[in-house]
Amino acid sequence: MSKYYFRKNEENCYKIEAHLDYMQENNINKMEVFEAKREKATGYFFCKYHLEVGEVAQSCGKQWCENYVPNNGKNGRCKHYGYVYEQTDKKRLLELELV
């Protein structure tokens, strides 16, 4: 499973490759990122279809969303269901040689 990381003062997390691309696009040669940890039992999820966070019991399911598509084709968790993450204290320094 790929690890995700937060930039300082950001609410979205990304894979290392995305951070390196960001650094190159913005001419940044050093940047500190923080490891992300999956939140469990919060009752929230990230909808990959709508690209927003919602409450599982109140916004995901056939009765709430016209784009609901169950994983097994009948019922249950939607195929657009994604996890939410929180920032940890584990830091990693990314360095990039700019040309």
Image (cartoon, helix red, strand yellow):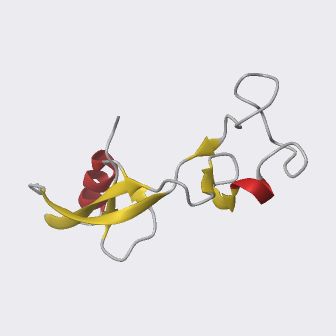
Look at the picture and state if 90 lies above or below 50: below
Is residue 2 something that shows in the picture? yes
Looking at the image, residue 39 sits to the left or right of residue 91; the answer is: right
- Horizontal and vertical percent for residue 5? 31, 56
Residue at image coords 29%, 46%: 17
Q: Position of residue 53 (x, y in %)?
A: 63, 61
The C terminus: image quadrant: bottom left
Residue 28 shows up from this direction? no
Name the image quarter holding residue 2: top left
Query: Which residue reaches farthest right?
Result: 63
Residue closest to the eye, 17 or 1? 1
Along the viewing direction, whichever of 60 and 97 lies nearer the viewer:
60
Q: Is residue 57 left or right of residue 16?
A: right
* The N terminus: image quadrant: top left
> Which residue is located at x 76 percent, y 31 percent?
70
Residue 68 x, y percent position in the rendering: 80, 40
Residue found farthest to the front: 41
* Left or right of 19 on screen, residue 14: right
Tell me which residue sits at (87%, 45%) in the image.
66
The x, y position of residue 49, in whole percent, is 68, 46
Is residue 56 placed above or below 62 in the rendered structure?
below
Rendered image quadrant of residue 88? bottom left
Give the residue displayed 31% in from the left and 45% down from the top.
3
Residue 80 figure quarter:
top right
